[in-house]
Image (spheres, rainbow, N blue to C red):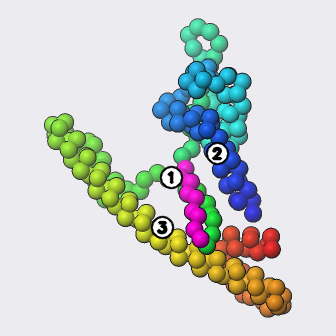
Amino acid sequence: MESNKNMGRLLDILGNETRRRILILLTKRPYFVSELSQELGVGQKAVLEHLRILESAGLIEGRVEKIPRGRPRKYYTIKRGFRLEVLLTPYAFGTEMYEPKAPRPTREYAQARALIKSTEPVEDKIRELVTFLAEIRERIEEIIRTKQELEEVRLLTETYIENLLRRIAQENEREFERLMREFGPRLPRKILEDLDDF
């Protein structure tokens, strides 16, 4: 249940347009408050409040830097990267968050590094990198399509199991408890949390 609350809070935070604009700016370079205020056309007090919310959610961090003249400035940067997916189907609504890890030394990673480090003429190098990038994008799209299909099947199955257990709980509490003892440890956490609220 806690993970659902955290995800809901994150969606609320990202639902604000000004906070999204701040995050987009911070993907380009570190900013301090008055710069953000000027870029966004929003007062510094409001920007500070948005930054406080983003920082408390662990999305950004601030670091103070001394400058040759004047007061030290607090620069804000993105703290961590993540990918948030929202899945809505006729059967269920769900969200999942993935945090990127350091790339494994795969064949593709080695190939990318070799292309980047190559010393061939710049035109040839860019041509090869663009071709390589197109191949990688195509593979990613294929994997995403496969993942979406499997997610549909997973959600359909989870929804059926949850609805079946709810029906059994209403009809025969003792049988429901027996099934939960037997299958509870193997059920997805989301089903257990939803059944707890039932």
Residue toward you, 32 or 142: 142
Q: Residue furthest right?
A: 173
Q: What amino acid is found at the position of numbered circle 3 in the picture?
A: Gln
Kindly report the distance in space between the C-alpha atoms of the residues bearing marks 1 and 3: 19 Å
Residue 174 percent location from the top left of the image = 84, 90
The residue stretch that appears in magenta: 82-90
* Secondary structure of the residue carrying numbered label 1: loop
Which residue is rendered at x = 58% and y = 26% of the image?
A: 40
Give the x, y percent position of residue 51. Answer: 67, 33
Numbered disc in front, either 1 or 3? 3
Q: Is residue 7 inside the magenta stretch?
A: no
Residue at the disc numbered 2: 15
| Residue carrying label 1 | 100
First in residue order: circle 2 vs circle 3: 2
- In the rendered view, tell whether residue 150 sits above or below residue 3: below
Indicate which disc residue 148 carries. 3
Give the total number of marks visible in the rendering. Answer: 3
User: Does the magenta segment cover residue 83?
Assistant: yes
Question: Which residue is found at the position 70% from the left and 54% from the top?
Answer: 8
Task: For mark 3, give the secondary structure.
Answer: helix
Quadrant location, the N terminus: bottom right
Task: Give the camera-side residue of 62 and 170.
Answer: 170
